[in-house]
Image (cartoon, rainbow, N blue to C red):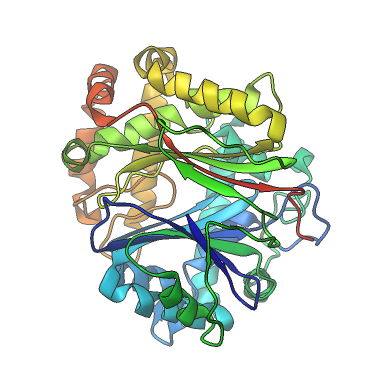
């Protein structure tokens, strides 16, 4: 693990990996708020997520189009406390992509008509979530994001986002960027010096194996380790923890639909056995995020959560036990499988309304080599999958049930 802190206090972490070759994997974590923050209401976090992809890189192309053309794969997610923009690119393109993205975020611009299209999609998703809430089978994590009793400052206490305009959203994204409410985590053969030059050419000092204080997660120490090494949990009040499970490349490449459905059964609201356990366990969590990333170029499943220090060991142990007993846990959530399939098909249907010839939708609906003009074919294939196929697939996809770890610690999870 290496880290550099620039003059603007933006932290960049480098997780070394021997499996990526000439590819670079970059994740930007935007801190969109928490129940302890008092920055006021800016609009819906999910609407901010949608809008980020529509930031203009130049006059004719937005971030979504740009990543589709220049990155190998990308994903953007909303959790209760974060928006994550993650993409994989070749080493040769990485610095150019970073430079172009930084330039776009330095002066955020979104076309009003495009923003209104995204707002309509989010409003439709809210209607779907609220209309099915009584069934108790939908993604409770997302429902909580819209819930008035959460008191989320970014969301306020209202489900109505019709009054939010493009200026409010662009100002919010600009505020997050200018106030450095984010950090960067990357893997691949790209030096911190190269990364540094892209963000701030005037800074030259590089630190190694040391994390200094920074606004997002005031961390002094972080670890990345294999299971054979002793797990070191920093002595801080709250911790941001990622458990990283490697997956079998050859199995993943040929079974993307199976992997997507499996990932949803593992961590997808109350339908996912792991995400449900993390949110409803005996030890209350400070915040929880649990979501799988399944990429064609870096095949891993990541479980991320934020918790009090005294809860971390128990959560890690229970998570590893849950993954170790994967097959029996799948049986427990098999009753939701038809709902999971319908939700997956619904995500694909949403992606069909994209302006681009690509199947790349938020959440876990990333399908390799599937284009939107093959929707009916893909839907038929999804509907033909049964739970036994998922259970058999789950026995072959994990390289190991022992994860690597990334742990950052901080005294407080708040803006200041």
Would you identify the image quadrant in which residue 7 lies? bottom right
In this rendering, would 282 be left or right of 62? right
Whether residue 108 is visible to the viewer of this picture, yes or no, is: no
Q: How many marks?
A: 0
In this rendering, would 196 be left or right of 23? right
Between 380 and 213, the one nearer to me in the picture: 213
Residue 275: % across, % down: 53, 29
Between 44 and 196, the one nearer to me in the picture: 196
Query: Is residue 366 positioned above or below 111 on the image?
Result: above
Whether residue 156 is visible to the viewer of this picture, yes or no, is: yes
Residue 12: % across, % down: 53, 65
Residue 31: % across, % down: 64, 58
Residue 276: % across, % down: 56, 25
Between 319 and 187, the one nearer to me in the picture: 187
Q: Residue at x 47, y 27 (%)?
A: 272
Q: Residue at x 52, y 56 (%)?
A: 84
Q: Residue at x 31, y 29 (%)?
A: 400
Query: Is residue 238 positioned above or below 205 on the image?
Result: above
Q: Residue at x 50, y 32 (%)?
A: 230
In this rendering, would 11 be left or right of 387? right
The quarter of the rendered structure image containing the C terminus is: bottom right
Query: Is residue 296 positioned above or below 109 on the image?
Result: above
Would you identify the image quadrant in which residue 62 lies? bottom left
């Amino acid at each position: 693990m290496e880290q550099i802190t620039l003059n603007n206090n933006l932290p960049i972490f480098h997780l070394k990996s021997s499996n990526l070759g000439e590819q670079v994997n970059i994740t930007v974590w935007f801190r969109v708020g928490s129940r302890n923050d008092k920055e006021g209401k800016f609009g819906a976090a999910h609407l901010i997520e949608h809008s980020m992809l529509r930031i203009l890189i130049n006059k004719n192309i937005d971030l979504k189009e740009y990543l589709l053309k220049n990155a190998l794969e990308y994903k953007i997610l909303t959790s209760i406390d974060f928006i994550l923009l993650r993409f994989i690119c070749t080493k040769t393109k990485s610095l150019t992509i970073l430079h172009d993205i930084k330039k776009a975020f330095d002066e955020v611009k979104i076309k009003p008509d495009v923003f209104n299209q995204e707002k309509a999609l989010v409003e439709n998703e809210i209607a779907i979530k609220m209309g099915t809430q009584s069934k108790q089978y939908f993604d409770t994590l997302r429902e909580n994001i819209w819930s008035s009793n959460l008191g989320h400052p970014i969301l306020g206490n209202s489900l109505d986002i019709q009054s939010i305009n493009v200026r409010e959203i662009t100002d919010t994204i600009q505020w997050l960027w200018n106030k450095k409410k984010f950090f960067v985590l990357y893997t691949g053969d790209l030096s911190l010096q190269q990364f540094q030059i892209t963000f701030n050419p005037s800074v030259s000092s590089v630190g190694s194996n040391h994390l200094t204080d920074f606004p997002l997660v005031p961390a002094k120490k972080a670890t990345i380790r294999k299971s054979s090494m002793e797990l070191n949990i920093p002595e801080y009040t709250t911790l941001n923890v990622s458990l990283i499970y490697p997956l079998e490349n050859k199995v993943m490449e040929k079974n993307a639909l199976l992997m997507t459905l499996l990932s949803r059964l593992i961590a997808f609201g109350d339908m996912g056995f792991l995400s449900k356990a993390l949110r409803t366990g005996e030890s209350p969590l400070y915040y929880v995020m649990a979501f799988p990333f399944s990429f064609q170029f870096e095949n891993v499943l990541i479980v991320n959560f934020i918790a009090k220090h005294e809860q971390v060991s128990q959560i890690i142990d229970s998570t590893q036990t849950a993954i170790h007993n994967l097959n029996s846990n799948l049986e427990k959530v098999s009753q939701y499988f038809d709902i999971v399939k319908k939700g997956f098909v619904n995500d694909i249907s949403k992606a069909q309304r994209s302006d681009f010839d690509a199947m790349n939708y938020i959440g876990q609906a990333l399908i390799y080599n599937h284009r939107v003009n093959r929707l009916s074919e893909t839907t038929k294939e999804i509907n033909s999958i049964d739970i036994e196929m998922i259970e058999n697939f789950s026995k072959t996809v994990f390289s190991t049930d022992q994860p690597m770890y990334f742990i950052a610690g901080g005294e407080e999870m708040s803006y200041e």
